[in-house]
Image: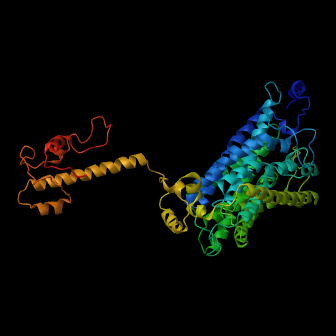
């Protein structure tokens, strides 16, 4: 902001909120605010990418459930971020301390507040980061987590992210005061999310039968969805990193452009290394998850210092992050930590590397004060920055694991965090959301559970997705009426031929008659000319389609008058 705008803002603040002081978080010009808001909108589209990726990695009978968890992350996680999360990260009350900020809860600056626009822009940008951190955990808990327990977890998990985010980015934070550098969140977002994912997967335990046949990855539910999710995340990551310049005024626009290019360079290096690794590991074949998670791991690695690196350095950082990711995934499986999407490796391991890489490769981004004038070890900056980055890793990892374990322990006392075994076998889509897929072995699972006398009343009447039950019933009735029509045609054709015996008639037509007296066929009812389909079906459909079809009206009234004729249903 220029001096006149700052003075005006200070006067307005003095009238409305005397305790407000313009911090760097709200030091936004009009063009900076536009940049931050636009970036926030794009970052929110990453929820689509997470949902597609995670739903593609799990079995089909759980794909809707994982999407619902992503929705809940925004709804409940976003609500609690407004309630208390933002205030715990960036509050400026008198009780704020180096561990936690206190203030600005239920954020809602009134009309006339000189910083209303800047406050709302800053809140929305930080909100997009907070919901991302929670969503990372949902994939690690997939296919066996009680949905109600997850809703409670999503509601409270805001605190797991917001407190360490304040350590790194808040003016009160002890890591920030020591000089820790993390531009776009390799530590506060990804490392916290990855550590939380690791802890939650370990506490939940592996899916039923996960390691009974070895440690090889399970088949993907929808590989195309997983690949599409990668592309959406790739797109969102550009806003994630470029938007973290927090504006385009002054020299910021130059570093925003650099952040975008270095983000892509890092992903190139990661994709290249993960491809080579997958070809080597699978004897010339390409494993989908090796490539997808390799690229994502490289993006996580480049995030902390996205505009502090040269192009070749971004390639190296991305390549190392990708390699660490694809090596960590099978390692965690051998440890018995069942992470269906690999979130612990992608966000946890690569988040550690991304934070440390700043201490090795960081430039001093003149004239910005991002690194407080310091440079990485390989740039002649000495050991200080590397030491602070390592301390950040230790603090964030410890907090992420311990706070998540404590939170899940408390939730488990209220609502069991693990699904019942029979619910896991049937799938969360059916048991939690009453969505029944076809051709996924559901009937087989129900049959296997029948002898155990599991109560399946709640799912007994669930219709398969993709059909309209009302239409299906109408079609069945139409077919039944058509079958009856064919039976009557066959009967009428045969009774019109006197050479066919009564026994032969019954055998051929499959119609059982119960005559009151010997059957007589008066000519007034049946003419010698065989009755055609058109003749019997007159009036088959009502003109206004208001009723289901019935047997033709042209003969029914005559047959009813015959005392020797009995209708057969």
Residue 208 visible (yes or no) = yes
Relative horizontal placement of residue 548, taking residue 19 as reference (left or right): left
Colouring convention used in this rendered image of the protein: rainbow
Q: Residue at x 8, y 51 (%)?
A: 520
Residue 358: percent from left, percent from top: 84, 56
Corner quadrant of residue 228 = bottom right
Please give the name of the residue rendered at 8% of the width and 50% of the height, measured from the top-left corner: 521
Asked if residue 47 lies left or right of residue 438, the reply is right
- Against 29, residue 42 (above or below) is below
Relative to residue 98, is residue 528 drawn left or right? left
Q: At which x and y percent is residue 61?
A: 55, 59
Q: Would you say residue 316 is visible in this rendering?
A: no
Q: In the current view of this chain or complex, which residue is farthest to the front?
A: 516
In the image shown, does 540 or 181 lie closer to the viewer?
A: 540
How many labels sit on residues? Answer: 0
Q: Nearer the viewer, residue 64 or 409?
A: 409
Q: Quadrant of residue 314?
A: bottom right
Q: Quadrant of the N terminus?
A: top right
Place of residue 101 in the rendered image (x, y in percent of width and height, measured from the top left)? 88, 44
Q: Where does residue 502 sit, x and y in percent of width and height?
A: 11, 60
In this orientation, which residue lies closer to the viewer: 410 or 131?
410
Looking at the picture, does residue 78 appear above or below residue 222?
A: above
């Amino acid at each position: 902001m220029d001096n006149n705008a700052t003075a005006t803002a200070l006067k307005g603040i003095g009238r409305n909120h005397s305790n407000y002081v313009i911090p760097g978080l709200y030091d936004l010009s009009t063009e900076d605010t536009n940049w931050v808001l636009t970036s926030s909108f794009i970052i929110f589209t990453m929820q689509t990418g997470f949902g597609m990726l995670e739903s593609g990695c799990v079995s089909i009978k759980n794909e809707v459930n994982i999407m619902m968890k992503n929705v809940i992350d925004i709804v409940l996680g976003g609500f609690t971020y407004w309630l208390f999360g933002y205030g715990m990260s960036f509050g400026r009350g008198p009780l704020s301390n180096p561990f936690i900020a206190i203030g600005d809860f239920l954020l809602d600056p009134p009309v006339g507040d000189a910083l209303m626009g800047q406050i709302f822009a800053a809140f929305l940008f930080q909100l997009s980061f907070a919901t991302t951190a929670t969503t990372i955990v949902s994939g690690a808990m997939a296919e066996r987590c009680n949905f109600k327990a997850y809703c409670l977890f999503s509601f409270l998990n805001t605190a797991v992210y917001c407190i360490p985010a304040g350590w790194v980015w808040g003016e009160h934070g002890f890591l920030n005061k020591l000089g820790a550098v993390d531009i776009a969140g390799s530590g506060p977002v990804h490392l916290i999310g990855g550590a939380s994912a690791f802890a939650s997967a370990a506490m939940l335990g592996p899916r039923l039968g996960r390691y009974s046949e070895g440690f090889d990855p399970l088949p993907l539910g929808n590989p195309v969805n997983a690949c599409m999710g990668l592309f959406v995340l790739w797109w969102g990551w550009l806003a994630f990193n470029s938007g973290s310049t927090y504006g385009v005024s002054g020299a910021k626009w130059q570093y925003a452009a650099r952040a975008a290019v270095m983000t892509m360079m890092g992903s190139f290096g990661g994709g290249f290394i993960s491809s080579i690794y997958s070809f080597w590991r699978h004897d010339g074949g390409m494993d989908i998850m090796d490539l997808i998670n390799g690229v994502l791991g490289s993006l996580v690695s480049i995030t902390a210092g996205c505009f502090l690196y040269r192009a070749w350095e971004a390639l190296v950082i991305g390549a190392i992050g990708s390699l660490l990711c694809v090596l960590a995934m099978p390692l965690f499986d051998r440890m018995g930590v069942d992470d269906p999407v690999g979130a612990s490796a992608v966000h946890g391991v690569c988040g550690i590397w991304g934070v440390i890489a700043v201490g090795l490769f960081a430039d001093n981004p003149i004239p910005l004060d991002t690194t407080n004038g310091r440079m990485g070890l390989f740039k002649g900056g000495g050991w200080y920055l590397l030491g602070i980055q390592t301390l950040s890793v230790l603090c964030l990892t410890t907090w992420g694991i311990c706070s998540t374990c404590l939170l899940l322990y408390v939730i488990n006392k209220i609502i069991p965090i693990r699904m019942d075994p029979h619910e896991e076998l049937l799938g969360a889509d059916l048991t939690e959301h009453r969505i029944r897929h076809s051709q996924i072995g559901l009937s087989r699972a129900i049959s296997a559970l029948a002898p155990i006398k599991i109560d399946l009343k709640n799912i007994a009447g669930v219709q398969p997705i993709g059909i309209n039950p009302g239409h299906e019933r109408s079609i069945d009735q139409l077919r039944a009426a058509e079958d009856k029509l064919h039976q009557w045609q066959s009967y009428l054709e045969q009774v019109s031929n006197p050479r066919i015996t009564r026994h032969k008639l019954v055998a051929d037509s499959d119609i059982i008659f119960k005559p009151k007296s010997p059957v007589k066929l008066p000519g007034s009812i049946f003419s010698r000319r065989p009755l055609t389909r058109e003749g019997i079906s007159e009036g088959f459909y009502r003109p206004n389609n208001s009723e289901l079809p019935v047997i033709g009206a042209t003969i029914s009234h005559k047959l009813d008058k015959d005392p020797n004729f009995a209708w057969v249903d």
